[in-house]
Each structure stands twice: as C-alpha cells, then as structure tokens.
Image: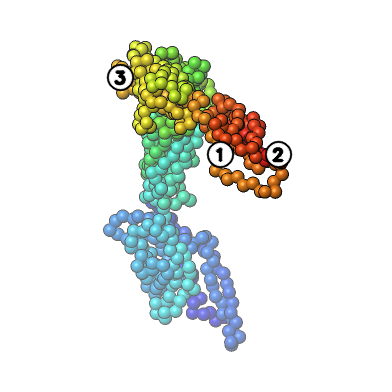
Amino acid sequence: MRKSTTSCLCHILVCLCFIQRCYGASHHIPADKVTIAKNQTKLANGETEVHHRPKRGWIWNQFFVLEEHIGPDTQYVGKLHSNSDKGDGSVRYILSGEGAGSIFIINEVTGDIHATESLDRERKAHYVLHAQAFDRNTEKPLEPKSEFIIKVQDINDNAPTFPDGPFVAAVPEMSGVGTSVYQVTATDADDPTYGNSARVVYSILQGQPYFSVDPKTGVIRTALANMDREAREHYAVVIQAKDMAGSVGGLSGSTTINITLTDVNDNPPKFPQKNYQLYVPESAQVGKPVGKIKANDEDLGVNAEIKYSIINSEGAAMFSINTDRDTREGIISLKKPLNYERKKTYTLQIEGVNSHLEPLFSYLGPFKDTATLKITVGDVDEPPVFSMDYYIMDVYENARIGREVGAVTARDPDSKNSHVRYFIDHSEHSDKYFNIDMDSGVIKTTQSLDREDMPWHNITVIASEVDNPSLLSHVPVTVQVLDVNDNPPEINKDKEVIVCESSRPGQVIQTMTAVDKDDFANGQRFSFSLPSGVPVNPNFTLKDNEGIYCTQYHLPCVSSYTTLPHA
C-alpha cells in the first residue's frame, strides 16, 4: 500500500497554558491523550492512500491570556506543536487572524505564542485566530488551517461606578421606617461571569441613622421614624458600591443622593399671642379693611393655608374677616358704621383653621387656634348732625319782609357738644329771598314772595361747629309759598262777536269765560253781571251760569251766556 507524503505527519498539538488568577500555574495537555483516525482515498491507479489523522480528546480551541500584563517581557500565551515535528526545524508554524503578527506573535520553529501588548478585556474580550503547520522544505501544509480563540482573562481592574450620579430624591416627612426612597445601581466593567470582580455590594457611608441601603439591591429606605421637615429638610446620603462581594481588597466607588423631606400637614396654625388690641376711628368706612391678624403655620403650600372666622356674635355683627391668599393674613373689615358715643369697644374671638387636613395626622390636632382681639373705637370730631334729613316749610305770599318761615336744628354728636352755627348756601341761587339766624337756625324772608311767580323755593342750610368751622353739614330746605286771593278774575276779550240777522230770539250768540291766577282753593265761584253805570242794550241779555274757576293752572269753566233779545 502506498502512503502519501503527509502520512508521517501528526496533527498540530496545541498546548494550552492556563494562567490561574491565584497561583499563576500553567498546564499542558499530554500528547498521549491523542488518538489516530484513519481515512482512505482511492487513487487513479487503483491503489489506496491511507491518511492518519489525530483525534483530539480535549477542548483545545481556547487560549487564555491575563489582561493588564505589566513587565518588559512578552506574555506567554500557549504552544502549537505537531506530531510531525521531530525537533529538526523542518516544521514551520504560521499564525493568522485578529492581532496576528502585531499583538500575538508565534515562534515559527517552536510554535510558542506570545502577547506583545498589555491587553484590556473591557476594550476587547477575545481574539479569533487561525493556526497551521507547513513543511519548511516543501511549503506544503501538514495540517488544515484550524481556528481557535484567545480569551482575555479578567482581573479586577475596574471599580464600580454610578454614571448618572449624583442623584436627587424625595420622601414625605413623618414616613414610617422602611419607606422606599430611591434605588441606586452601580456598574462594574469587569467580567460578571468570572469570579467576584463585578459582584457589587452596597453600603451607606453617610446618612445614618436616618437612612439605610439594601446591600444587594441598592434600595435606599428610611431608617428613622417621624423625621420632621420643619426640624431638618435636606439630607446628603453617600452610598458606596464595592466589588469582590465586598471583601477586603475589592474596589469601590461612591455617589451622593440628595434627599429632601416633602411637607405634610403635621403642624396646626398658631397665633403668636392670645390677646391683641386694635384702634379703629369711628370715621372708618364700612366695607374697608381696618386691621389684620395672622396665625403662623410651619407647613408649606396648601398645608399652611388658613381660613379665619369671627366666632362670637358681638364681633361678627360689626366686623368681617377674610384670608389674604398671598400673605395668609386675616383681613378685618367693618360691616356697620361705628359710633364712639354709643359703643367704645368691641371684643372679637377669631379662629384660624387649616383648610386642608390629612386624616393620617389627625392625632396631632386639633388643626386650629383662637385669639382675642379687642377693638377700641376712636373718637373723631364729627360735623354737626341735623335733626332731620330734609325740611319742608311754608309761608303765605305777600307776607311782610322778615316773616319767620321755620327753623332748623343741628347738634354736635361728639361728647364735647360744641356750639353750632347756621348759614344759607347762596352759591346755588343768586336771589336772596331768605336768611337764617346763625345761632338759632330760624329762617326769615328777606323779600316779598309771589306764589304766582315762584310757588316753591329750594335752599341749602349749612351747619358748622364753633370750635372747628371746617366741619360742615348740609341739609336741603324746601319752602312752599301759600296762596292768598290777590288776583281779580280776567274775562277773555279777544274774540269779536258776530250776530247773524237771521238769529232767533233766545239763541246763544257768545259764551263768556273768566280766569283767576290764584289757587283754586282760594278762588270763588265767578258771578257775571253787566257793569253798573253802563247803558244797557235791550237787544241783549246776560245769563249767569255760576261758572267756577276749575284749576290752579287757570283753566276756566263756562261762566255766562249772551242771548238775543225777545222779538
């Protein structure tokens, strides 16, 4: 049987150097672990060519090289060896693939592979290469090209980090122990599948005894009950993440979580003092603010909103109170006019109540407080007050000058009871028909009055205090001029009477009318007659119908008729 030229070559034996993390020992796979597989090929001349192929009994296609190698020498990776290699230099080993010739070099004679650079697993975790053995003399391959991988073996060279830190978190004040606040997660660039290099354990460096952290999950929780925002609002919690499962020698990194306690309504309103005093002049306007009061609440936002009210009837009848949303003060306003002479003091019971209550914290209540406000009414020098809001007087026309029409009275409402003087405001009317006695307030005529010319007079009387003339009061006075019968009737004479010659005896040819300017109440029934001393025409007669004056506006009724004489 003819054998091929390669029948004397065994396969490439890869000797793997296992570099252990702790011991640094290397192990070689013995050649006696290899068995031979036989393959036959039928040639053209009928002869059979037998190929002897080595059969590998171990996983050979991975090398391991330790990352971050430090030192001047290259790092040994492993060895390629063929059974055909008799040590005479006739076999040449060739390496190709990722990093071949640059990062990884091979001794073509011995098959030893070395790494020329310090490798970083976090940049590249493995390299794919190809190995082949050639006959140095014929340059023919002794073995088909085989693929293998060089894995960069991890060391703990990366500390845990918190890429997104520092962090901000919030939790309501008064939360129970164990309330979840925030979860932090550290990352470790080392190999999580190898050893404990990337196994992180969390611990708290700063923030105790207020907070705790779960060593496995990184969940931060409250560790102290009833933390009060009003006592302390902000906390800086420092969390450490340590690899190697927290053991000695592990690398660590830390981050800060800035935790804020948010507000809840756990504080009732409080008035700084229980008794207040307020001075309000009696001249204060109704509906206008006269004072303010404020209760303090240590909470924030809606939790500090306060509604004020006056809870006693005496105060509520005269005053009202509303809340200013911006300042949270109770604004006190006047509901009715004040009068110092009638009531000099008022007592108000004022209550402040939180608008928004939380049942969870009702045991901290009641969420309200009360205070007493004593209001002193200030005496103000007020203008005189007339006894009536307006006056109506009357006087007969043609009364003598100086005739008394009536009197007005006013008094000083203040306790000193200053003397009052009176004046007529002549700025409204240029004609001066009346004057007034400045001391008594008696109004008299200064001119003769004619009802038919002006039946009503409107004047304004001014009162002032002697002690303070600048304080003035005004009152309207209306004077009615009463009628007297001082005007004779007037007969309408404008019309010309025309008598037809065909008129019959007794036929009415004209109706005579009369008017009177006086008031109908004083007007008499008109009596018509022919004047004496005037010659009487026998062709005509006058009949008196006892006509009367109908209205004060001089609308007369029929007074008499003129008739034809008898035939």
Q: Quadrant of the N terminus?
A: bottom right
Q: Nearer the viewer, mark 1 or mark 2?
A: 2
Amino acid at circle 3 = Asn
- The answer to whether the residue labelled 1 contacts the one labelled 3, judged by CB atoms less than 8 Å apart, is no
On the question of residue 103 being in view, the answer is: yes
Of callouts 1 and 3, which one flags the residue occurring earlier in the amino acid sequence?
3
Q: Which of 122 and 565 lies nearest the eye of the viewer?
A: 565
Amino acid at circle 1 = Asn
- Picture residue at 54% right of the left edge, 31% below the top: 533
At mark 1, the secondary structure is loop
Of callouts 1 and 2, which one flags the residue occurring earlier in the amino acid sequence?
1
Res. 566 mark: 2
Look at mark 3 in the image and give the residue it sits on: 468
Q: CA distance from mark 3 to mark 2?
A: 86 Å
The image quadrant that residue 323 belongs to is top left
At mark 3, the secondary structure is loop
Q: Which of 164 and 351 lies nearest the eye of the viewer?
A: 351
Q: Which of 298 and 494 lies nearest the eye of the viewer?
A: 494
Amino acid at circle 2 = His
Expressed as whole percent of the image width and height from the top left, the position of residue 527 reads 60, 29
Q: Is residue 410 above or below residue 546?
A: above
- Picture residue at 36% right of the left edge, 28% below the top: 432
Q: Nearer the viewer, mark 3 or mark 2?
A: 2
Q: CA distance from mark 1 to mark 3?
A: 61 Å
Q: CA distance from mark 1 to mark 2?
A: 26 Å
Look at mark 1 in the image and give the residue it sits on: 492
- Picture residue at 57% right of the left edge, 35% below the top: 535
Tag 3: Cα neighbours inside 10 Å, few (<14), some, or many (≥20)? some
Expressed as whole percent of the image width and height from the top left, the position of residue 233 reads 40, 32
Q: Is residue 301 above or below residue 309?
A: below
- The answer to whether the residue labelled 1 contacts the one labelled 2, judged by CB atoms less than 8 Å apart, is no
